[in-house]
Image: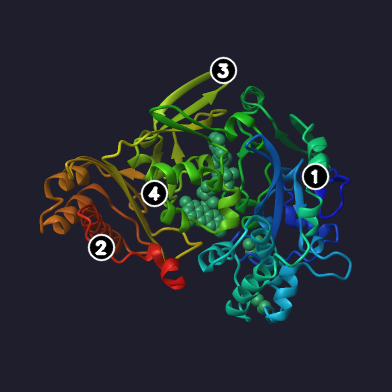
Amino acid sequence: MKILLNQSFKAVELGDINPNTTVLEWLRGNQFVGTKEGCASGDCGACTAVVGELSSINNKTEIQYKTINTCIALAYSLIGKHLITVEGLSEGNKLHPVQKAMVAENGSQCGFCTPGFVMSLFAMYHNEKTVNLPKINEALSGNLCRCTGYKPIISAAFIAFSEKKQESLDFYERNQAQLIESLTQLSGQKNISLNFKDGNKNILFDAPSDIATLSQVLSKNPTANIVAAGTDLNLEITQSMKEFSHIVSVNRVSELKQIDETDTEIKIGAAVSYEEAKSILVKYWPDLDSFLERFASLPIKNWATIGGNIANASPIGDMPPVLIALESKLNLRKGDSSRTIMLEDFFISYKETLLEPSEFIESILIPKPSNQDRLITHKISKRFEDDISAVCMAMNVKSKESIPHSVKIGFGGMSGIPQRAIELEKVFLNNWDKDALVSAAYEALDNEFTPFSDVRASSEYRLKVSAALVKKSSLMLKGIPVEDLAHYSELQSS
Ligand SMILES: Cc1cc2nc3c(=O)[nH]c(=O)nc-3n(C[C@H](O)[C@H](O)[C@H](O)COP(=O)(O)OP(=O)(O)OC[C@H]3O[C@@H](n4cnc5c(N)ncnc54)[C@H](O)[C@@H]3O)c2cc1C
Ligand code: FES
Ligand code: FES
């Protein structure tokens, strides 16, 4: 089971490892100790590395490089991909431009976070032609530093780019053709099925490359754990010290990685990541641009899937309220049979869904909007980026001559499941332009939901902030400007 690693064109064998092994464990176990472990939960960025995958853009094969959190990605999820760590940046004694800029700007003190920052800067350097503050903030959204502070690191990003034209291309740009050839040879590794023996234990790993094989594997092994990116599931390995006895990875299944469009509908494969889905989502629902900015950090968005967010069934997952408001459906598959259900019916109770053993989410179907439709989204969390919602609200309003005649509202954080607010929808249509909206919305919410109190927010706060969000949405519909934290990074750069 091979990957490309750093500046070598020759594939490296991952070896006979426990399928529960993370990329970070594998790296450090193989003396690539530049990549650090801080939180082991995707939050601090000390473990950031870059992964390259072949992709075809305008019939031209390219390698797309993106940051990931190696602490919560499984080593076997990289089979056939290119892994670049901090050891792979300099050429001999010649530092990479982003490393040089970090040195020049004193971007490091204790140095623990530095490899992670350098890798985030490297990915941005590689992927972007120019930078500005919002782009830098997004690139660094998954990296925490406790001692240097962010100013010197942001300066380093600007300096590296200002010198980009003068610098010779970095190793990976100069050698793209040969790296594409090496990765193409590795792409021959199709359906993968492994059995790792650990004493008396057998730990199984399957990574099918097509949907028919995935269905067969799951039908034969209904208790196996499906993993997509693992940004939820793998926390059980790194935080709860759990070991899965059979892992079935869906992130190589070609049908689950597709995005298709008809005149009326968008179909997003369950294993499509946020960054992959972003352009089509934002094209039809521009409000999602600032909403997705609030979702996790860039390394998480690069890797995590929309199907995983739905199947995880967390009451505070961000996509379900949005997709419920958009009246989305799910295509579910079990063996040879498929069914299509409304997403709002998928969640039964806390962390429980309609999925049967061996059934999986194949795709998400979203009706296209008409030009009278408006999607408004709000996320309330303590931090701007890389934080989980206390409350998430999405409102999909259909209007005629600027008067709303239909509305669908989805909520996260207001009950044990992501849920549609049916009573509130009626109240909104009757009161959207009246002063009584906030009190009427509060009453409807109080009837319809019993929010929990936890570290993020009290039950009462959740009710009150939701009623305020309803009011804010009505002002937005009327075109009245409202202060919006979503434009925080634009404000910063102005
Ligand atoms: C640092 C950090 C920040 C985060 N921030 C946010 C945030 O802001 N908002 C938010 O909503 N979430 C957030 N998350 C949670 C997580 O990233 C998302 O829920 C993500 O979309 C999960 O996708 P995944 O591919 O990683 O799922 P996985 O972890 O691979 O799987 C999650 C669950 O879904 C099941 N599953 C996956 N795919 C399928 C399928 N096709 N069919 C059936 N079952 C399937 C798995 O068995 C598992 O039970 C964050 C996580 C981290 C670590
Ligand atoms: S170790 Fe903190 S994000 Fe991976
Ligand atoms: S330099 Fe010490 S944590 Fe960043």
Q: Residue at x 12, y 45 (%)?
A: 430
Mark 3 element type: loop
Give percent across and percent down for residue 140. 59, 66
- What amino acid does circle 3 point to? Asp
Mark 2 element type: loop
Residue ID for mark 1: 177
- In this rendering, the answer to whether 184 lies above or below 380 is above
Residue 286, numbered label: 4
Q: Nearer the viewer, mark 3 or mark 2?
A: 2
- What amino acid does circle 1 point to? Ala
Give percent across and percent down for residue 316. 42, 52
Res. 197 in view: no
Residue 481, numbered label: 2
Lower sequence index among marks 1 and 3: 1
Closer-to-camera residue (435/18): 435
Residue ID for mark 3: 336
